[in-house]
Image (cartoon, rainbow, N blue to C red):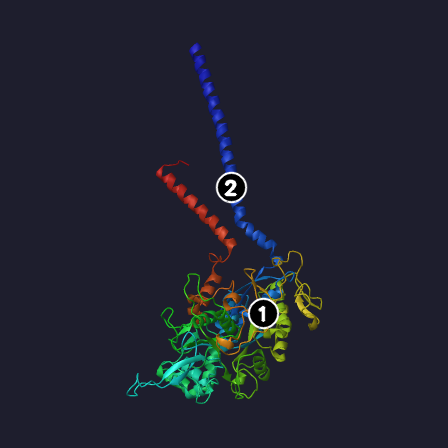
Amino acid sequence: MAKKVVTGKTTATKQAGQAMKKKIGARSGLLSRSILAGVAVLLLGWAVAPFIAGAQSDSAEPTELRIANTHESLAAASTWLGAVKNIPGSTTARQTSGGDAQSKERLITGGADIAVSGTPFTEAERKALEATGRSVIEAPVQAVGMSFLVSGPRPQGIQLCEFVEQSPEDDPNNELPPDCFPVRDFEGPLRLTSANLADVFLESAVNNWQDPEFLSLLAEFPPGGLSMVSPIRPASPVLRGDAGMANLALGTYLRTTQPAKWSTRSSSLFLNPEPEPNATWPFDRAPARLGMPDAVGVVRRWGTASAAVDSPAEAGAMTMATPLAAAEAIRAEAEEPPFDATGLENLKTDLYVAQLKNGAGEWLSPTPAGITSALAAGAGAPLFAVTQNVPGAWPLSWSNSIYAPDSGLTGVEANTVAAIIRWQSTVGRQRSAELVEGQLPDVLVAQALAAADKIVSSNCTAAGLKTVLTSDVERFAPAGTLADLGKTLWCDTPLEGSPVVDEGPAMDPFTGAVDALTGAIVPVVAGVSATSGSTSGTNSPLSASSATPSSASATAGSADFSAESADTATGGIAATLPAVTVARNMPLPLPGSDPRFDRLATLALGGLMFLGVRALMRRSGLISA
């Protein structure tokens, strides 16, 4: 009996222990499930938090306005961004640069909110934008002139010399040509006829340096006096690979003034019918660089656009540039130190800004007054002074416009775009000469102001927003700048939660423009002159104190288009539109396009990986549950 009692006690003890283990196990399982549930809740919260935050901040408006600029508009864009930097409720801005076609394409495909271009939207571009449910509003904002930056046939430019007969000792049979002893550098002006430009950019066999008319126009050559040693080859063209108004303007100018040379070039390439001038240079295999900063840099370095790296411009080179970019290249080259950081001697290139003849038969340099006269006479028509008798007008002049959509902008973004347009039509217009640009004629200013109203009214449609007509514009525009316009139309967005740009000094955009991305102050000095001449002697057009924003400075924080983008531009809108269409038809955004969905995708993929690894471990016997 005693043995049975002991056994019963033992059994009871075991049962009690098992019960205790079950309780502990249950508590442990509950704790594990609680921990897992807590982790799941945290992960889920991490994934959906951006969506909740996004929903809560919808009324606060997005904080970035994406601007697709052309290279010609970058200097003006720096002034716009400097002017609107500290408007209460204004958006920050991020800008990219490229050709006119690339800028419009970015607007169409959703890569930019607004675009700047000198070429209007084509029918195909309008239809592509309409396919996204939007149409475009045009606002002229900038009077542009194009100049030609030229390097001489030698690094030191055009050297004037005096021909002296060989001595009898050196040439007893009188068979050698006279020696040309250098006297001094040529100091300008350098004048190029339309035939000279056609010979260079249409790659004619004619040597522009030996053209009798060209030599006769060099005012430095007195009759029977000094001369020059001409290179055996013509100057090298450095064309623009970015599809835009620069190529269209050059092609139109050459075909209008030199139709026979245009036809000859077409025939040499077996092009039938001959091509029309276009935003893309129509003659294949022409030596080109992607954009204006690159093209100007090649000429400044005394190089060419040939395939060879650092191929020297033994016969000189020339490219298209804004007067400001050309003037900056000349100034920077003149101020370059004699030696670089490694102790090697720097090669200083003499550069010239060429004079051209306008339709009135005058030889002119590109000046703000000349650009203004051309656009005023033609009511904004591009290249009006090429053929028309307009005294003082620079022939290669046109206007750049901001193109904005009639829907899709937030109220704050619409206000920012309107502020840019109205500021540029008033303050920017009055001070455009400080960027070596012209003034828009009154007819284009009226068009711009009407477009600003339309951009505001068509985009101020979200719930809780309304338009307001007011002369108290401190909430919407740079203080004290738009008072002369009287009452203007704005989108009355809520003040609470409206994003304000980062604090910083309110810089005068003409004396110190603040870069949109880096916050660096870019110096701009008034009174820049783009007169012709070299950097040597008395002909240096800019002194060391006349600092202007270089192409590199003006584009600080801006990304040039890559080779892939350039191929897209030449292929037209159809080259990129299919990818955008696919992205829009997907149930979720593509990876990288929306950080919120990227978080959700990360969580989903992590969960799937966990389940997959656990299934493999259970199958292999490493775990039992």
Q: Is residue 257 visible?
A: yes
Q: Amino acid at mark 2?
A: Val
Closer-to-camera residue (478/328) = 328
* Whether residue 12 is situated above or below residue 346 in the rendered picture: above
Q: Is residue 1 visible?
A: no
User: Going 52% across and 53% down the picture, which residue do you hit?
Assistant: 596
Q: Quadrant of the N terminus?
A: top left
Residue 116, compared with residue 497, is above or below; it is: below
Q: At label 1, which amino acid type do we have?
A: Val
The residue beneath circle 1 is 525
Q: Which residue is mark 2?
A: 39
Q: Nearer the viewer, residue 179 or 420?
A: 179
The alpha-carbon separation of the residues under discs 1 and 2 comes to: 59 Å
Q: Residue at x 46, y 16 (%)?
A: 9
Q: Position of residue 500 (x, y in %)?
A: 62, 58
Left or right, residue 243 beside residue 418: left
Q: Earlier in the sequence, mark 1 or mark 2?
A: 2
Percent across and percent down for residue 144 are 54, 76
Q: Please give the label number shown on residue 143.
A: none
Q: Is residue 301 left or right of residue 386?
A: left
